Image (tube, rainbow, N blue to C red):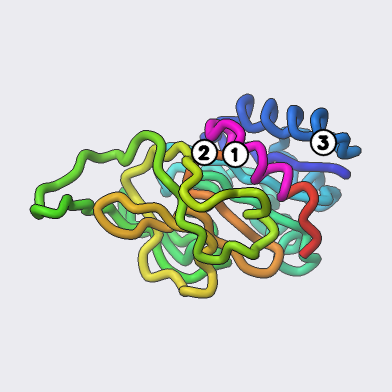
Amino acid sequence: MKIAVVDPGSGNLASVTRALERVIRESGIAAEVAVTTDAADVRAADRVVLPGQGAFAACRRGLDALPGMVDALTDTVMTRKRPFLGICVGMQLMAERGLEHGVTPGLGWIGGEIAPMDPRDDAGAALPLPQMGWNALVLDQPAHPLLAGIAPGAHAYFVHSYALSGGRPGELLASATYGGKVAAIVGRDNIAGTQFHVEKSSLVGLRILANFLRWTP
């Protein structure tokens, strides 16, 4: 199995790669991981991972700057149905558009837009942004293969000030609560994305990565 980790110039690539390599080693899965900026590597991959951190607009510009990469992702993921996992801003890029630093088109693979958060406590006071730290997961679709072995209330590590808004209910796999409901994992068919950093989410993140490598949508 070939796993392509796409480098848009703004991802936690070393941590993502180490986490995937640990999962491969501990699970006995026959796979190799390669970080790439080459569209040909994506077309040859069996699975694709798109990390991202920072601003939506900057990540999209980085992706667009890689010759042929958006077309390769569209062909590999949406046409040939290779399993895909977006992480943090990589997950956000799956949406229709982002509103950070202007309006920027997303890949349009899931519904909704990435909008600024406005979290409030029960008294109406603003909660700190970015949402940073460990938050409990609510499993909206607990039977989804990516959530196998994940218990309701398991914690994952979030760092973000923008979140999916107006998404389609059927595409929400898991959520968290931070002054309201926050999309934590989205997906449909062969695509999925985590708003939180799976590579920083300890055993929960490793389990999700292992589930992704075994996933046969």
Counting from the top left corner in percent of width and height, residue 113 is at: 40, 64
User: What secondary structure is the stretch in magenta mostly built from?
Assistant: helix
Q: Residue at x 58, y 62 (%)?
A: 142
Question: Label 2 near label 1: C-beta < 8 Å?
Answer: yes
Residue that label 2 marks: 197
The answer to whether residue 65 of the structure is visible from this angle is yes
Name the amino acid type tagged 2: His
Instruction: Name the secondary structure under disc 3.
Output: helix
Residue at x 80%, y 60% (from the top left corner): 216
- Does 172 sit left or right of 69 as displayed? left
Which comes before the other along the chain, label 1 or label 2? Answer: 2
Residue that numbered label 1 is attached to: 205
Label 2 crowding class (10 Å Cα cut-off): few <14, some 14-19, many 20+?
Answer: many
Provide residue 119's location: percent of width, then percent of height.
22, 52
Q: Which residue is mark 3?
A: 27
In primary-sequence order, the first of circles 3 and 1 is 3
Q: CA distance from mark 3 to mark 1?
A: 14 Å
Which badge, 2 or 3, comes first in the chain's sequence? 3
The quarter of the picture where the N terminus appears is top right
| Residue stretch in magenta | 199-211
For the view shown, which residue lies furthest in the right direction?
30
Residue at 46% x, 37% y is: 157
> Quarter of the image holding residue 207?
top right
Q: CA distance from mark 1 to mark 2?
A: 8 Å
Q: Residue at x 34, y 53 (%)?
A: 177
